[in-house]
Image (tube, rainbow, N blue to C red):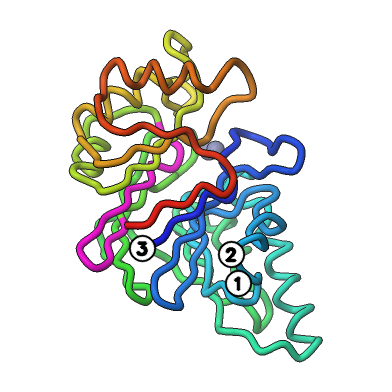
Amino acid sequence: MKLTVVGYWHGYPEKGEATSGFLLEEDEVKLLLDCGSGVLSNVQSYCAVTDLDGIVLSHYHHDHQADIGPYQYARIVNKGMGVEMKEATIYGHQDDQAGFSKLSYQNVVKSQAYQEHSPLKIGPFTFIFKKTTHPVPCYAMRIESRGKTIVYTADSSFFPELATFSKGADLLIAECSGYEGEQIAQYGHMTSEAVGQLAKQAQPTKLILSHLPHKGDHEQLRQEVAKHFFGEVTLARSGLQIRL
Ligand SMILES: [Zn+2]
Ligand SMILES: [Zn+2]
């Protein structure tokens, strides 16, 4: 598997950047994990929009799905120009019917629902979903392909089952929305300290910190996580690529 960080900002994208979005590739299959603000523009540094097989959404907060509408328009514009395209599907949960109902678009984008604990096969990937602790329904993803595993926490405060769900991943992408001591669990987010506890229990081979705050020095987040977890900790940045 190859994973590229397309966007990693919390809430809104900084200049020229994007909120949550990760390009996942294996063989010829290309999927986006979340599609936040700025993702559709920035993903084109790595592949054509028309080459995407689809998008897997964790939840319907703007910073994870703001570019769904532009993606639908990109499909219809390219179809109108006669560009050859793969079929595309957007995968989402149905806990929020209003959110799910906006995913399919005319005859250029299909939608498909996923369910917690029910494996979903997309090309070479097998996805398993786990509901997180967040103000709106949100699902973490455990993705396996050819014996390698990526876990993406999406948005969540820490809870013990999240560590069980993330156990032994080759790569854990954890949201890290605040610094040690900040009271953000009540908003359904993790501080560096919470991520440190998560990683200490889950013991991933590699850890990427994402969903980063618009303040402070992110290097401090990395150091705070490293007090609890002694493995490899990397700050997300646009264009960061991991091959597993
Ligand atoms: Zn959220
Ligand atoms: Zn978010």
Q: Nearer the N terminus, badge 3 or badge 2? A: 3
Mark 3: which secondary structure? loop
In the displayed structure image, the side of residue 117 where residue 208 appears, left or right? right
- Front residue of this view, candidates 95 and 238: 238
Image: 65 above or below 90: above
Which mark, residue 104? 1
Mark 1 vs 3: CB contact within 8 A: no
Kindly identify which residue carries mark 2.
Answer: 101
Q: Find out whether residue 147 is within the magenta segment.
A: yes
User: Where is 209 relative to 213, above or below?
Assistant: below
Which x, y percent locates residue 10? 59, 33
The residue under the point 49% across, 56% down is 33
Marks 1 and 2 in Cβ contact (< 8 Å): yes
Q: Position of residue 15 (x, y in %)?
A: 76, 37
- Up-down relation of residue 25 to residue 93 (above or below): below
Q: How many neighbours does mark 3 have within 10 angstroms: few (below 14), some (14-19), or many (20 or more)?
A: some
